[in-house]
Image (cartoon, grey):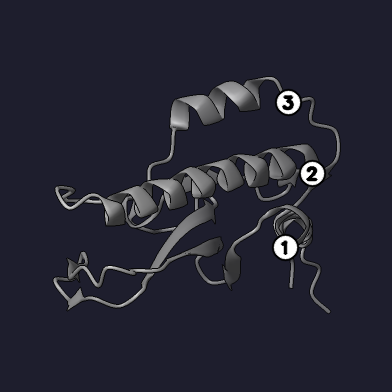
Amino acid sequence: MAKYGFLDILDEEMGKNFPFDYEMSWDKKNHAVELAFLLEAKNQSGIELVDADGESSDQDIYFEEALIFYNPAKSRFAAEDYLAAIPYEPKKGLSREFLAYLVDFLTQTAERGLDALLDFLADEEAVEFELGWDAAAFENGRADLAETDFYPYPRY
């Protein structure tokens, strides 16, 4: 039977506090967990948009972004493919307090991103939309955490 460690806590915090659709993918071989979420916006004006792959569409917008939790010694990934990369120590894992803070920060980031996406759709002069992660603000908030209960990387 698998023991999911910090994945259980992350899923619990996301389920309680994250208002957008999300999905967690555990890549056991790469010692990584991807947390993807979806922002949805109506394209009421039918503006033709071109995505990062060069595909154009005038349909509603479904913008997917992801974070990755990774083992610094074992995981391999392209950082530019993720909104943020969160390292963990395998045996120590991540604390409940950190995961709750991360979900709160991610919620605020996603809400600002959705507002920016709606502004982008309303502005005929806008050329590009990109969701940003404020790493400095994230680390500043993290510095104030009192972490007590840690949950290790999942075992299987």
Q: How much space separates mark 2 and mark 1, taking CA atoms?
A: 14 Å
* Mark positioned earlier in the residue sequence (2 or 3): 2
- Residue 89 or 98: which is nearer the viewer? 98
Name the residue that disc number 2 marks: 96
Residue 9 point in image, percent of width and height: 78, 55
Q: Which residue is mark 3?
A: 145
Please, what secondary structure does the residue beneath circle 1 have?
Answer: loop
- For label 3, the SS is loop
Q: Using a 10 Å C-alpha cutoff, classify the residue at mark 1 as few (fewer than 14 neighbours), some (14 to 19) or many (20 or more).
A: some
The residue drawn where x is 63% and y is 27% is 142
Badge number at residue 154: 1
Residue 72 seen anywhere in this rendered image of the structure: no
Q: Quadrant of the C terminus?
A: bottom right
Amino acid type indicated by mark 3? Leu
Most foreground residue, 59 or 108: 59
Residue 100, image x, y percentages:
73, 43
Q: Tell me the amino acid under the disc marked 2.
A: Arg
Three-letter code for the amino acid on which mark 1 is drawn: Pro
Kind of element beneath mark 2: helix
- For label 2, the crowd category at 10 Å Cα-Cα, with few meaning under 14, some 14 to 19 and many 20 or more, is some
Q: Residue at x 39, y 54 (%)?
A: 82
Q: Residue 147 sits in which quadrant?
A: top right
- Using the numbered discs, state the Cα–Cα distance from disc 2 to disc 3 in whole angstroms: 11 Å
